[in-house]
Image (cartoon, rainbow, N blue to C red):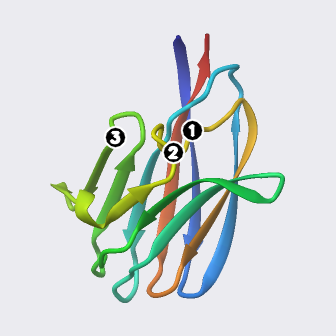
Amino acid sequence: LSIRRQRQMCKETGAGVVVSISVTNDGNAISLPRLTFACTGAAASGLTIERLVNGVARDTLQYTGPIGAGQNLEIDCRALRVTLEGVAAYAAFSATHPAWLPLSPGVNVLRVTMPSGGGKLRVIYPHTWY
């Protein structure tokens, strides 16, 4: 498995807003991203990130705990680590796939929803080859 150059995508989301992010894995193997959510406004909760295939959610990550204004939530799919301000935050986290949010080769569409609060979601992922 060879990992080359990392890429970043960043989108802003707000309460009740559904945002789509397209990320392209130029490799031929799955890529496991690192997601960082920075709460930029009022406290946020209910962050849901889905990977869609043909418009249907195949993988879902959900963080149901509160994210205070100015706080950062990080979900590292490769390390299987969830932290809020650097402290383990697994209790409020769930994933529907044992390999959290695997990005297939080619274009991947992520749907991000948050019922309250808002902030910026950054998706950092390597292009990966066998």
Q: Amino acid at mark 2?
A: His
Q: CA distance from mark 1 to mark 2?
A: 9 Å
Residue 41, above or below 74 = below
Tell whether 21 sits left or right of 76: right
Name the residue beneath numbered marker 2.
97
Q: CA distance from mark 1 to mark 3?
A: 12 Å
Tell whether 66 sits left or right of 21: left
Residue 37 image point, x, y percent: 42, 63
Please tell me whether mark 1 sits on a helix, a strand or a loop. Answer: loop
Within 10 Å of disc 1 (Cα), the crowding (few <14, some 14-19, many 20+) is some
Residue at the spot 31% in from the left edge and 64% down from the top edge? 72
Name the residue beneath numbered marker 1.
102
Residue 129 image point, x, y percent: 62, 15
Residue at the spot 30% in from the left edge and 67% down from the top edge? 92
Q: Mark 1 and mark 2 in contact? Answer it, CB < 8 Å.
A: yes
Within 10 Å of disc 2 (Cα), the crowding (few <14, some 14-19, many 20+) is few
Q: Residue furthest left?
A: 87
Within 10 Å of disc 3 (Cα), the crowding (few <14, some 14-19, many 20+) is few
Please tell me whether mark 3 sits on a helix, a strand or a loop. Answer: loop
Name the residue beneath numbered marker 3.
80
Q: Amino acid at mark 1?
A: Pro
Number of numbered labels in the structure image: 3
Residue 95 image point, x, y percent: 45, 53
Give the number of the disc on residue 32: none
Mark found first going from the N terminus, 1 or 2:
2
